[in-house]
Image (spheres, helix red, strand yellow):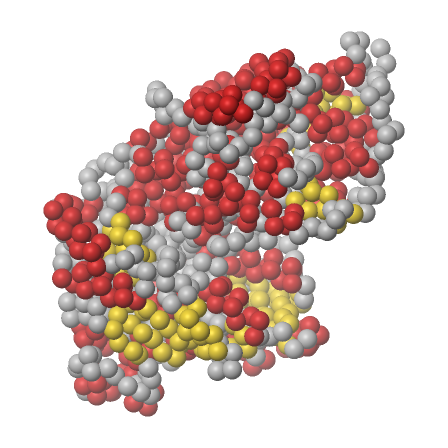
Amino acid sequence: MAAPQNPTERAELAQALRTAVRGEVDLGATARALTTMDASNYRRVPIGVVTPRDADDVAAALAVCRAHGVPVVPRGGGTSIAGQATGTGIVLDLTRHLRKIVELDPVARTAVVQPGVILDELRTAAAPHGLTFGPDPSTHSRCTLGGMIGNNSCGAHSVAWGTTADNTHALTVTRYGGDTLRLTRGTVPEALTGLPELIRTHLAPLRTGFPELPRRISGYALDALLPERGTDLARAFCGSEGTLGVVTEATVRLVEAPAARALAVLGYADEAAAAEAAPGLLPHHPLTVEGMAADLVRAPAGLPRGGAWLFAETGGATPAEARAHAERILRAADALDDTVVTDPAGQRALWRIREDAAGTATRMPDGTEAWPGWEDCAVPPGRLGPYLRDFRALLAEHGLRGTPYGHFGDGCIHVRIDFDLLSPPGVARFRRFSEELADLVVAHGGSLSGEHGDGQARAELLPRMYGDELFALFARFKDIWDPDGGMNPGILARPARLDENLRFEVLPKRPVDVEFGYPHDGGDFSAAVRRCVGVAKCRTAEPAGTGVMCPSFRATGEEAHSTRGRARLLHEMLAGDAGDAGDTGDTAGVITGGWRSTEVRDALDLCLSCKGCRTDCPVGVDMATYKAEFLHHHYRRRLRPASHYTMGRLPTWLRLASRFAPALNALARVRLLAALTKRLAGIAPEREIPVLARETFTRWLNRRWGKGTFIFSNDEVAMVWPDTFTEHLSPEVGRAAVRVLESAGRHTIPAGRGLCCGLTYVSTGQLGKARKVMRRTLDRLGGTLGTPLVVLEPSCAATLRTDLPELLPDDPRAAELASSVRTLAQYLEEYAPDWQPPRLDRPVTGQTHCHQHAVLGDAAERRLRERAGLTGELSGGCCGLAGNFGFERGHWDVSVACAEESLLPSVRAAEPGTDVLADGFSCRTQLEQLGGVRARHLVEVLAEGLGEGLGEGLGEGTE
């Protein structure tokens, strides 16, 4: 089935779709680029994207596509790991509108859902009734029920609650062409002519050809149609990977969720020992038996001694009952070491290691890239230990490495392998290994796929598992459903080769000329962009705990404004301008403008440069850096937006303006003049212009010391970085820091005059200017380089820690300065460990700065607050101002939406007398302008608690 080959045919298709469908129809470059890939190694370029509003729209779109001979691929969260969520025709995006929980019946323990419902949304709706949906993939915060049905997803709790097929009661499905069928147990719709005969005439192979194991996901589940199994058509449809039709509604079963849970963690010598122990735990009825080895765990905090671990979760009506259940498992297991974790926060921390594995496993400990493709095999649980040993031997034979983990209780193993998928010899080795591993899995009585489906990664090898006769039945089953072959061709039946359509083929063969050093990617921007493997943690509806990523996606709900979406656009941009892949059928990039691409520019425009993805993304995608890189090239030798000249060069303007602060503040209060200034400067009209300080921080500090010469020993001096915001806009923070540091026995001096980290230049992509500013700063610091440096503004501290050495990788002074940066709390903990903060004993609220979370960490701040008696948690997410972002024209709505997500609600909910903390100038400004709340830096609250003992004249040294 071929896609339209010329613009006229495409225009006719677009018009027909827009006439028939009430939802959105987009055949533009951005929509196509965003859906070229899922979370697999594969890439197929679609014609366009349709986002149906309801089931009627789905039917209408499928009718139009059949009339035009255009293939269709249904898509949920796009987290499939085998390539089945990519296609060359029309992508049906089912996540935007079809996400309603139609009915939830707690008595019958069922729910009726549309395909775009996110799994966590269903679990949240079921929780008040003590119920949940049993299957729970690690992508539970963003995967959809429709996608789970398509892949027959499982998750960690399948040992207790089974697969998605086990929990699906009935389906409403629309076929290619638009007719709708109701799939239940015991009946076959008349429209599926030939299906009863197919089953009746092939009973023997259907009864003997399917291996009996809990995680057999590969191929079509034709054995579910056997008469002794009730002719369960809904079950047979599960796992069909979008090749038979589109689910528009599903009735699913719910299970009782334990009121309390405990986690038994058992340590073993290696993964094979853990695998052999796993089946022995099953008679004790755990909810999960998960396994992982030490080479996946970067920081084994909270884990017992061992080289591999089993996680066995237990449930109970009370915490004591859950713990007793876990302790019974410990007694039954023969582990090197073990522990029981009952604290919910401790359990979440351990589960986060496991859930992020799909991303963290994409980098080996030495930084080498690793890829999916064979992350999903399953064998009988009793064979898992021997299989893992053979698997490791096969890896070694091919000179490959991988980090196995997964559902040991079900015999299902996930692994990312360091295939070379960039060169022809590497791809050839990938193919040879795949063929040999398929034979190994079959020899152990296993399934090529144990959870994620076959897709393009494994479907070609299904004859090795099922034999030619049964595999031929798969094609006949597909033809009964889809005689025109329009549903997701190339997947399962008549599959594409496993080494075709690799997403790396289109990328540049040589490193791209870039400004940042990309030290974790060998200086290669393409490798940096390849970090995004599509697991889509950035598409979650709310930040996890104190997490940040991705505020713009949560504000807009648009894939283009997620970290993954932007990475996909950059990937297509790097593919170059070799032509339109949809027109020619080749593998050229969809984005043809290179660094001048307006599609990439528009997607990056709403990136807040919060750096949240640098930490929250399991593979460390750093979109803030990629954005700065792109803006540098996009506007090189071109006119920039006004805000780049104003807010992007803020340090220069503030230095000039500081001597005229009173007059400028007065002029800013003149409404018409302020409106004109904001218009010319590219500032959002809704914003208020911040007030300039009458006296800068360094001027105040120098005035305190007078003009004499003061001599202190090095261990008495604390150097404070005079960042632009503390210096010119909030010197009260600097003055408070002086009071606190002096109370800790440290004499405070400014690091120097005219210093700048380059933050505003970096965030607006003026990287040449940023380098000049940074080098000038290094020159002025001179002999003080390496001295511990207290930086009060988190965004400036993060810039010095990361952007400085990455923009000046060849200057050793940059790394030296970066290593000397401390937050105030870090400095006090390291250099004044005996200092006791004032005991304040009151609650706090507010938000941890994005850059603090992503780059600096806030552990020292948490400990300092605890010692001072400041109770309460700061919220996650982003304040939405984010430096210049929230001030720029066109960003107001997103900025407000980000603030309304976590920060403003937490402040409004605070009890009277609660201190509002915000260490970043942007966060404090956002709270003041949107919430009418005066927030303070932690150091201001501490200084207030010190009382009036440290006045302006104290702390002067001796001449």
Residue 906 drawn above or below residue 514: below
| Residue occupying the point 65% across, 17% down | 662
| Residue 495 sits in quarter | bottom left
Q: Position of residue 416 (x, y in %)?
A: 42, 55
State the residue lying farthest toward the top: 708
Of 508 and 735, the residue lying toward us: 735
Q: Residue 907: x, y in percent? A: 65, 47
Residue drawn at (41%, 73%), measured in percent from left and top?
112
Which residue sits at x=34%, y=21%?
A: 638
Compared across the picture, whether 398 is left or right of 608 comes to left
Q: Quadrant of the N terminus?
A: bottom left
- Residue 380: tell me if it is visible: no
Furthest-right residue in view? 949
Relative to the observer, which residue lies in front, 849 or 517?
A: 849
State the image coordinates of residue 296 (x, y, percent, origin top left): 52, 55
**Does residue 60 appear in the picture of this structure?**
yes
Quarter placement of the C terminus: top right
Q: Residue at x 56, y 27 (%)?
A: 689
* 448 to 255, vertically: above or below: above
The quarter holding residue 578 reads top left
| Residue 800, position as x, y percentages in the image | 58, 29
Above or below for 59 versus 789 = below
Judge left or right: residue 324 versus residue 524: right
Q: Residue furthest bottom?
A: 228
Q: How many marks?
A: 0
